Image (cartoon, rainbow, N blue to C red):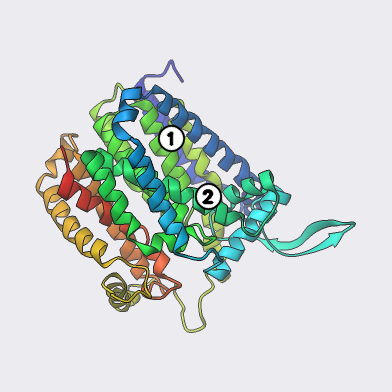
Amino acid sequence: MKHLSPRSRGWVALINLILVLVVSLFLIPKDKLPGLIRYATMPILAVSLVLFFRVLFRQVLRLPKQAIKKRFSKWVIVLILVASGFQLVHEDYRYKILMDEYNLTSTSLNMHVDKSAYTPTRGRIIQGEYEFIDGYIDKRPFLYPFLVSIIHDISGYRMSNPFILNSVLCFILFLVIYLGGFHLGGKRGGVLAILLLAGLPLVGQNATGAGFELLNFLLLGLTVFLSLSLTARPGLDKETLLVLSAILLANVRYESILFMLPVMLLIAFRWKANSRLGPGWITIWAPWLLLPLLLQNRWFRSRTDLWELPGEVSQPFSLSYFSENTGHAVMYFFNLSAEFPNSLFLTIAGFISLFFLTVVSLKRIRNWTKWRPRDYDILGLWGLVLAGHMVIILCYHAGQLDSHYATRLGFPIHLILVQAPVWLLVNEK
């Protein structure tokens, strides 16, 4: 690929994206989907993770020591540890959303034992060895159970291993949130971001459970931070990290593949602004890393039984649910009861700041046409995307956010509620 011009490499990346969509959605026969999903998912997830950490370590090693010292000090590390530790001690470790979390752990067990993306439902012991004899291709993307299965591979299978993973992810989450805040407002911005997120009980609720919501929020925060970083100081490694982060994010929750759209938009604008800085080889072939996920999505859409709809519900999504679910969302966000894992302070500060962010972004929309986006442009784009995500949740038949079962569905919008006040109050740019 080195002999190709940057513009040609961009066209090859686009062709690969179109090809993977055509192959996954039309060319592969339906009867081949279960086998391909089951046995191709783990290797491709492994490749995605290896590529991501390879580029990440290379990028970190290139950072001058002065840049690291500028961002971190002992008291910042202590604050990150205290904030993450606080979330882990005020909630009990246990399985909470039982059907989802037991299902994910069961899938991770099969990934550990059989090395395939498959959810077992029945098994038996034959000559001292446990063998699965029945199961199905789950509707849930497989990155989270794959990470849990790695812990199984290291320490042996335990029902508590998801708690270990989520505890580590909680610390990494506050580290990423600090970096995002630092980008917007220096150390004061990083500290404010930590404090705002630390006051949200929903974080601790998910950090001490066995679900994939915390991983989804972490990768969403990382993707937004990389969007800001790439826009401020473009580079091939940053672009590659952003692409791989978005691909990993898409492999956590069903609807997280929607977050690929702003990433592709940002990269397209960046290529248009500077065609001499074309995509690297990982970005060119990255669309193929989405193949198992697209196949799984196609399989999911063909199996109406996987929606698990209650008897009185005929459609999983409908505009008719929106008005009622909006009332439930208001009850959640502005609730003063300790029974709900919301933060009233974050709600008020976040939505007020988001309003000003929207106004500024719309007034200076010409920054996009000239490809001179600023931090508020990037945050405005992600605010729009996350608001759109919230609308989708409110059009979901089970999108009552004041229900303890559904509260986690509103987790992503809290990211912009944390970052918007940092931009408004302590932005140094």
Tell me the quarter of the picture where residue 308 sits. Answer: bottom right
Rendered image: mark on residue 404: none
304 to 310, vertically: above or below = above
Mark 1 and mark 2 lie on one chain; the one further toward the N terminus is 1
Dot 2 falls on a residue whose secondary structure is helix
The structure residue drawn at horizontal position 24% and vertical position 33%, both measured from the top left corner, is 232
> Foreground: 322 or 355?
355
Dot 1 falls on a residue whose secondary structure is helix
Q: Position of residue 138 (x, y in %)?
A: 59, 60
The structure residue drawn at horizontal position 16% and vertical position 54%, both measured from the top left corner, is 358
Q: Is 232 displayed left or right of 219 in the figure?
A: left
Residue that numbered label 1 is attached to: 15
> Foreground: 4 or 346?
346
- Kindly identify the amino acid type of the residue bearing the numbered disc 1: Ile
- The answer to whether residue 25 is seen in the rendering is no
> Foreground: 337 or 302?
337
Q: Position of residue 107 (x, y in %)?
A: 64, 57
* Front disc: 1 or 2: 2
Q: Few, some or many C-alpha atoms within 10 Å of disc 1 (few <14, some 14-19, many ≥20)?
A: some
How many numbered discs? 2
- Kindly identify the amino acid type of the residue bearing the numbered disc 2: Leu
The structure residue drawn at horizontal position 40% and vertical position 76%, both measured from the top left corner, is 403
The structure residue drawn at horizontal position 53% and vertical position 54%, both measured from the top left corner, is 141
- The answer to whether residue 423 is seen in the rendering is yes
Residue that numbered label 2 is attached to: 293
408 to 172, vertically: above or below = below
Q: What's the CA distance linking mark 1 and mark 2? A: 19 Å
In the image as oriented, which residue stretches furthest toward the bottom? 312
Q: Is 365 displayed left or right of 176 in the figure?
A: left
Q: Is 273 displayed left or right of 178 in the figure?
A: left
Q: Is 243 displayed left or right of 187 in the figure?
A: right
